[in-house]
């Protein structure tokens, strides 16, 4: 059997055992490495990154990153739970950090460890702006893009050998190969550029997630235009790869009506209803108090 044909057979067998689907888009993906292996590797890369990085001393901006990030993470978990997908992120532990670095960049490591560089904050004028960035990064984590990229590389480099081990459930060897392919621990391979497809998907899911958190997704177009005008010569994760700026912006414009209808309107209505309920409960309680005190006076 030719090698390529063998790969297809192997890939065929794998789809039975290792195919997941991406929340919110439903796209099926190849995930050969278990969540716990990816999370473990991601955590060690994140820990060494944070040890070498300088955490920002700007308290206002750091708080902003944490506030917006946590709100998006909470809305994401709520949505996944309501849709029977809570297991997708059950071992995640969200963390949002601002680091002292002038690059216009942000990245996400598996398991929900998100880092924003101070340089990017120069383009952020509001929580809605920041939500565009953080929604995009949370989306990479939720869509398990790191696992998929690792799986694709394993398939390409180790083909049958890796596949055989995975199929036989030899998790130790699988992990050894995964680490070799990924180079985790040795460098920050998790920051390697995602594919164009992953970037576009993270844009789409990111818009949905920021919307679910009640941030206005209309902001994304203006924010990307600002990023594009900034035209950093470096190629950070956030800008990198891929969809050219104009393609990215036109895709966002194309997706906005659906996103708003599906995710934003519902989020805003729920928030509005909630605050209305809180207000009416408060006034009901207040009038109850009045009645009680009146009746006490009597
Ligand atoms: Zn990205």
Image (spheres, rainbow, N blue to C red):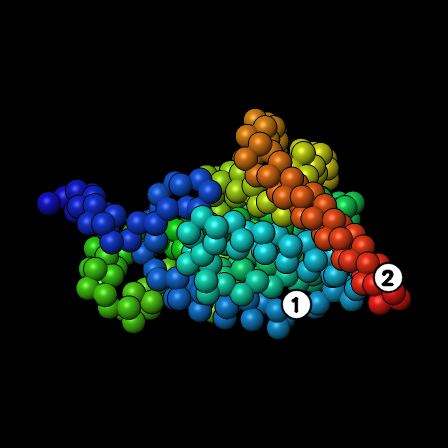
Where the N terminus falls, by quadrant? top left
Neighbor class of circle 2 (other Cα within 10 Å; few <14, some 14-19, many 20+) is few
Residue found 64% across the figure and 54% down from its top: 71
Could you tell me if residue 238 is visible in this image?
A: no
In the structure shown, which secondary structural element does the residue marked by tag 2 occupy?
Answer: helix
In the image, which is nearer the foreground, mark 2 or mark 1? 2
| Upstream in sequence: badge 2 or badge 1 | 1
Q: Which residue is mark 2?
A: 294
As drawn, the residue found furthest toward the left would be 1
Against 217, residue 120 (above or below) is: below
Residue 103's x, y, as percent? 69, 53
Pointer 2 and pointer 1: residues touching (CB < 8 Å)? no
Residue 221 location in percent, x, y? Answer: 67, 33
**Residue sitting at the far front:** 298
Q: In the image, 298: left or right of 108?
A: right
Query: In the rendered image, which quarter is residue 74 located in?
Result: bottom right
Q: Residue furthest right?
A: 297
Q: Is residue 184 above or below residue 215?
A: below
Q: Where's residue 137, x and y in %?
A: 57, 51
The residue under the point 46% across, 42% down is: 24
- Image position, residue 177 (x, y; %): 32, 64
Pick the residue in front: 180 or 195: 195
Q: Looking at the image, can residue 17 be seen? A: yes
Residue 194 vs 229, above or below: the answer is below
How many C-alpha atoms fall within 10 Å of the one at disc 1: few (<14), some, or many (≥20)? few
Q: CA distance from mark 2 to mark 1?
A: 62 Å
Considering the image in quadrants, where does the C terminus appear? bottom right
Q: Residue at x 45, y 56 (%)?
A: 86
For label 1, the residue is 53
Taking the image as shown, residue 37 lies to the left or right of residue 260, namely: left
């Amino acid at each position: 059997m030719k090698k390529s044909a063998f790969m297809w057979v192997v890939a065929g067998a794998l789809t039975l055992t290792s195919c997941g689907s991406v929340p919110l888009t439903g796209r099926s993906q190849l995930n050969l490495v278990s969540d716990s292996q990816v999370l473990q590797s991601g955590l060690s890369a994140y820990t060494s990154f944070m040890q070498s990085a300088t955490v920002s001393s700007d308290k206002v901006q750091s708080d902003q990153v944490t506030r917006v990030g946590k709100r998006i993470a909470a809305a994401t978990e709520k949505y996944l739970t309501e849709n029977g997908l809570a297991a997708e992120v059950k071992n995640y532990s969200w963390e949002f950090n601002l680091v002292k670095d002038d690059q216009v960049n942000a990245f996400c490591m598996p398991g929900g460890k998100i880092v924003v560089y101070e340089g990017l904050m120069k383009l952020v004028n509001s929580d809605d702006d920041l939500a565009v960035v953080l929604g995009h990064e949370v989306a990479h984590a939720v869509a398990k893009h790191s696992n998929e990229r690792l799986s694709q590389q394993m398939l390409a480099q180790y083909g049958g050998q890796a596949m055989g081990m995975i199929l036989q459930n030899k998790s130790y060897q699988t992990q050894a190969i995964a680490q070799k392919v990924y180079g985790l621990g040795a460098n920050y391979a998790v920051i390697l550029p995602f594919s164009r497809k992953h970037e576009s998907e993270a844009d789409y899911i990111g818009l949905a997630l920021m919307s679910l958190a009640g941030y206005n997704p209309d902001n994304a177009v203006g924010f990307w235009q600002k990023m594009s005008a900034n035209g950093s010569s470096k190629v950070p994760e956030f800008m990198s790869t891929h969809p050219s700026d104009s393609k990215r912006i036109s895709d966002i414009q194309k997706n906005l009506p659906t996103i708003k209808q599906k995710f934003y309107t519902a989020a805003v209505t729920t928030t509005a209803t909630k605050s209305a309920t809180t207000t009416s409960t408060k006034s009901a309680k207040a009038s109850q108090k009045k009645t009680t005190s009146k009746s006490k006076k009597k």
